[in-house]
Amino acid sequence: MNAIRAEGLVKHYGEVRALDGLDLTVPEGTVLGLLGPNGAGKTTSVRIITTLLKPDSGHIEVNGIDVLRHPDQVRRIIGVSGQYAAVDEYLTGHENLEMIGRLYHLGKRKARARAEELLERFNLTDAAKRTVKTYSGGMRRRLDLAGALVISPPVIVLDEPTTGLDPRSRLGMWDVISERVRAGATLLLTTQYLEEADQLADNIVVIDHGRAIAQGTPDELKREVGGERLEVTLGSRAEAQSAQEILTKVCASEAIIDEAAHRVHAPVTRGSWALIEAVRQFDAAGIEPVDIGIHRASLDDVFMKLTGQAPAEPSTEQEVAA
Ligand SMILES: Nc1ncnc2c1ncn2[C@@H]1O[C@H](COP(=O)(O)OP(=O)(O)O)[C@@H](O)[C@H]1O
Ligand SMILES: [Mg+2]
């Protein structure tokens, strides 16, 4: 069963085509990372899923409920940060969180405990007894995130939940997210941080200009775009040049040399075989690598390649495939 299913979402803001036929599915109990650069359409997608914005066309369901027809029902099963402006300026941080818990019938003791736990997680314990009026922008943002996590809704949607967070709050956020998913929640989070998508998401949809340009598990995306390469660091420029010849033969593909770093690399398909064969031939040629290994593409490489944000000359293609 899919907790979120969107089909053919289109949304314009005047001339701007913010969403251009976006499809998304999030199986129940999984985390989808919606990854894309600024202006890709992440927030627009989130606002549509969370009933705050109507698409020009397309279909969207949350837990099988039609979002456009029954927004009230959807609001009851979805937890959202940032948009409900639920935070009351004249209450303290603690009171705000406790109030949300009480509103959702958590019970006094539980609401308090949850408030304390979240304040701690989001690095707000020292400010817990101050009214929100006195909070900085960053503190408000953290309180708002905490507010979205007071109760445990079955579907959680977070728009760039860690953008601009201090490292400690970011880790706190990751912990809370992981706990909620372990407890069975479904989560959609948008992010510009590849590392975050890699860490948290079961599946990733990369969007650009309102369209999905790639999707899969983090591993699938890395494999699809980057593949593997064999990389060797040598002790001298002369050795690096000899190694370049050997790698070109072993990998059956022109090896790239970085003469200044004494480093050589080439794309490989059968990584471990190529590694062994290269070591054998280096040995025969009296070359002793300082370092040798297989490198997988990182999600950064995938992203850069897909969104075309890296230089696209042939020689840098190789760099991108690192
Ligand atoms: N209220 C708005 N009015 C006009 N254009 C908008 C509005 N909101 C977003 N856009 C435009 O729609 C596109 C997608 O924006 P958005 O969904 O906010 O992207 P993201 O969250 O990925 O940065 C961008 O080109 C943005 O400038
Ligand atoms: Mg956004």
Image: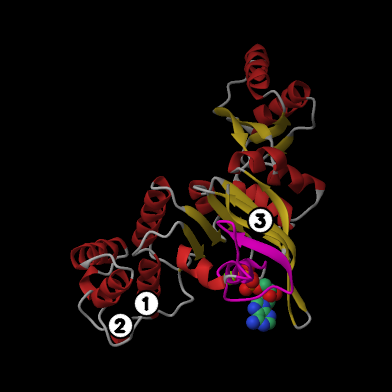
Which numbered mark, 2 or 3, is in the foreground of this view?
3
Q: Is residue 15 shown above or below 153?
A: below
Which of the two labelled residues, at mark 2 and mark 3, occupies the earlier sequence position? 3
90 left or right of 109 in image:
right
SS class of the residue under badge 3? strand
What residue sits 66% from the left and 71% below the top?
Answer: 39
> Callout 1: few (<14), some (14-19), or many (20+) C-alpha neighbours within 10 Å?
some
- Image coords of residue 147 (percent x, y): 36, 70
66 left or right of 309 in image:
left
Q: Is residue 61 shown above or below 244?
A: below
Query: Disc 3 designates what residue?
Result: 24
Of the numbered discs in the image, which one, if any, rests on residue 132?
A: 2
Which numbered mark, 3 or 1, is in the foreground of this view?
3
Query: Disc 1 designates what residue?
Result: 140
Residue 73 falls within the magenta-colored stretch: no
Corner quadrant of residue 281: top right
Which residues are drawn in magenta?
Answer: 40-69
Tell me the distance, in whole angstroms, between the alpha carbons under discs 2 and 3: 36 Å
